Image (cartoon, rainbow, N blue to C red):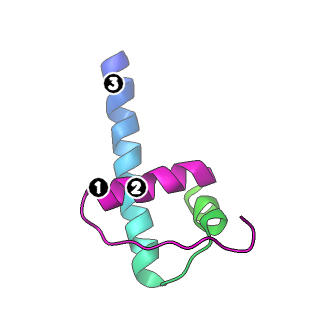
Amino acid sequence: MAYMRSRVEAMATTSRLLTLLSLMQARRDWLGSVLASRLATSDRTVRRDIDRLREMGYPTESTMGPDC
C-alpha cells in the first residue's frame, strides 16, 4: 500500500514539474503565487519544484518581488 502511494505521489510530482516547465516556457516572468494557483499547490511547493528543476540542470532565475 505504501509503495503504491509513493508511486502515485511521484507521478503527480512529475506531472506537476512538466506543467511547470510548460508554463515557464510560455511566459518569461511569473509570480510564485500565480504559478501556485495554476498548479493548484502552495507557494512553498512551487519553490521546491523550481529547486528540483535546477538540480536537473534547467536554468531558472528568480527575483524577490515587492510582496516579499
Q: Residue furthest right?
A: 67
The residue at 39%/26% (across/down) is 5
User: Which residue is denoted by mark 1 in the rendering?
Assistant: 55
Image quadrant where one finds the N terminus: top left
Residue type marked 1: Glu
Residue type marked 3: Met
| Nearer to me, 65 or 45 | 65
The residue at 40%/72% (across/down) is 22
Circle 2/circle 3 CB separation < 8 Å: no
User: Which residue is denoted by mark 3 in the rendering?
Assistant: 4
Circle 1/circle 2 CB separation < 8 Å: yes
Residue range highlighted in magenta: 41-68
Left or right: residue 52 compared with residue 36: left
Q: Position of residue 60 (x, y in %)?
A: 39, 71
User: Which residue is denoted by mark 2 in the rendering?
Assistant: 51
Image quadrant where one finds the C terminus: bottom right
Residue 41 visible in the current orientation? no
Query: Looking at the image, is mark 2 or mark 3 earlier in the sequence?
Result: 3
